[in-house]
Amino acid sequence: MNISLNITKTITELLSGFMPEGAANIGAMVTIALIYLAIFAVAGLYLVLLERKVAAWFQLRLGPNRVGPWGLLQTMADALKLVSKELTGTVKADKFLYNLAPYFVIVSSLMALAVFPFTKEFQAFDINIGIFFLIAISSIGVIGILLGGWASNNKFALIGAMRSGVQTISYELSVGLSLLTMVLLTGTLQLSEIVEVQKNGWLIVQGHIPAIIAFMIYMIAGTAETNRAPFDMVEAESELGAGFHTEYSGMKFAYFFLAEFINMFIIAAIATTVFFGGWLSPFGITESIPWLGVFWFIGKTFLLVFLMMWFRWTFPRLRVDQLLTLEWKYLLPLNLLNIILMAVIVWLNLTIQF
Amino acid sequence: MSYFGDIYKGIKTLLTGMSVTGKYFLTSRKGAITQQYPDNKETLKMFERFRGEVVMPHDENNEHRCTGCQKCELACPNGSIEIIWDRQIDPESGKKKKMIDKHIYHLGMCTMCGLCIEACPTDAIVWAQNFENSVYDRSYLTKVLNQPNSKLKAGVED
Ligand code: SF4
Ligand code: SF4
């Protein structure tokens, strides 16, 4: 079977058949953006459903099972409900920023999706600073949260937004440094090449001890980055109502909600690409059928997403001071030590290669 | 070295927690505690310790164990129980004796604290496990627990 999944090239070629080149490029970009948007809006909905099911199973419940077979249409129904709801707002809100905030959040999380190599071919945008781009983009979302919290003119929203700021600024460091540790091993920032390097063993195997430490730190910091429990002080229900999105309703709330789930997917997808060989199959068992890579990629990503859900439904929420202690006293120093360890290992060629 | 000790302990306790929830996750399909209520209305049976309402069991001869001692009425913190009694001639001994007329129980006021059941010296009242207690008028919530023409079981008072 020979399916060409190189969508950027395929669509550009298709369009340039009847368009001037510049228009074809722009047309291709728009088409790809729409395809990604459609795929990930639906994927986001099903992530929500998955989360609810997993949560239910962790708590010995059944989870949604009424709408459609096994409740598969539940989140569709929820989305319809949210679309049909009135968009309320506060009188004293800063209207412009208030309306802008959800788009900031959702756009920044969708932008990050562009660079992931789902297979060798299926990658919308392969820039040579992929990891750097991801780290940069993933922290833009917090601006949306800060804006939303500030513009809502609501105490709870503001406190939630400020906590989010504190949290993202701190944990950004750990995410960046733990990925940097792995970059020491790959020697490149380009995601497609990072996957290429892993043909001799996934990086978590190649880099053994420091890679595992980096992975653990990355998962902790990544969970914090997505503002999910146990790091969900941003929307701590018992303290802040709904946190930064207290004043949002209907579709604007749904954007925040969807963004959270897409962010979770992104964090897991970065981990998949950097630690677990992206679309590579274990021991190269399906190497001859490249398009199967999509399933490997998605499969690994969902395992990691499941891990994050497991965290969420096991651990209690941290306090703000505990959160900062964890980052600045534990994760950061360990991370710096870990980088040195990794550098030594790469320098002495102690990596495990197959 | 308590710094690294803390990290070790932290990771260990986190993993312990995750293993607990993980076990729940794996067994959840069999042991789900959710009752899909209106669907299994026919078969749903509440567990033993469920507190539905206070009832007074009667045996086949329409006899109960309530002596009318009023201890439950005194024990109830919110006055959900009223005992109406009078002195009647006991047919066996021919003496005048305190006997129960009506044991009135206000389900609408009851907090299901169970103190009346604790207090009853003859175990005349027990918990029932029924749970579909909603009615259209609150007067239905006032119940007379002893059935009409019922009488005290012989030997309970001894
Ligand atoms: S259960 Fe408590 S509130 Fe209800 S009747 Fe008995 S003592 Fe009163
Ligand atoms: S129910 Fe028990 S406590 Fe209440 S009056 Fe009857 S015997 Fe006494």
Image (cartoon, rainbow, N blue to C red):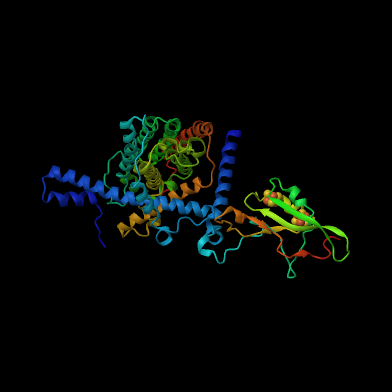
Percent position (x, y) of residue B60?
A: 73, 70
Report how many numbered discs are placed on residues in the image.
0
Viewer-proximal residue among B146 and A145: B146
**Residue A301 in sight here:** no
Seen at 23% across and 51% down, the residue is A7
Check the image and report above or below for A78 versus A87: below
Percent position (x, y) of residue A26?
A: 18, 43
Percent position (x, y) of residue B35?
A: 54, 59
Image-quarter location of ligand 2: bottom right
Check the picture and name the quadrant holding the N terminus of chain B.
top right
Name the quadrant containing residue B124: bottom right
Check the picture and name the quadrant holding the C terminus of chain B.
bottom right
Viewer-proximal residue among A320 and A270: A320
Indicate left or right for A29 with A277 as reference.
left
Check the image and report above or below for A318 versus B56: above
Viewer-proximal residue among A74 and A137: A74
Check the image and report above or below for B64 versus A308: below
Viewer-proximal residue among A94 and A62: A94
Percent position (x, y) of residue A235?
A: 46, 38
Indicate left or right for A58 with A127 as reference.
right
Seen at 59% across and 40% down, the residue is B9
**Residue B32 in sight here:** yes
Indicate left or right for A294 with A244 as reference.
left
Seen at 68% across and 50% down, the residue is B80
Indicate left or right for B94 with A313 as reference.
right
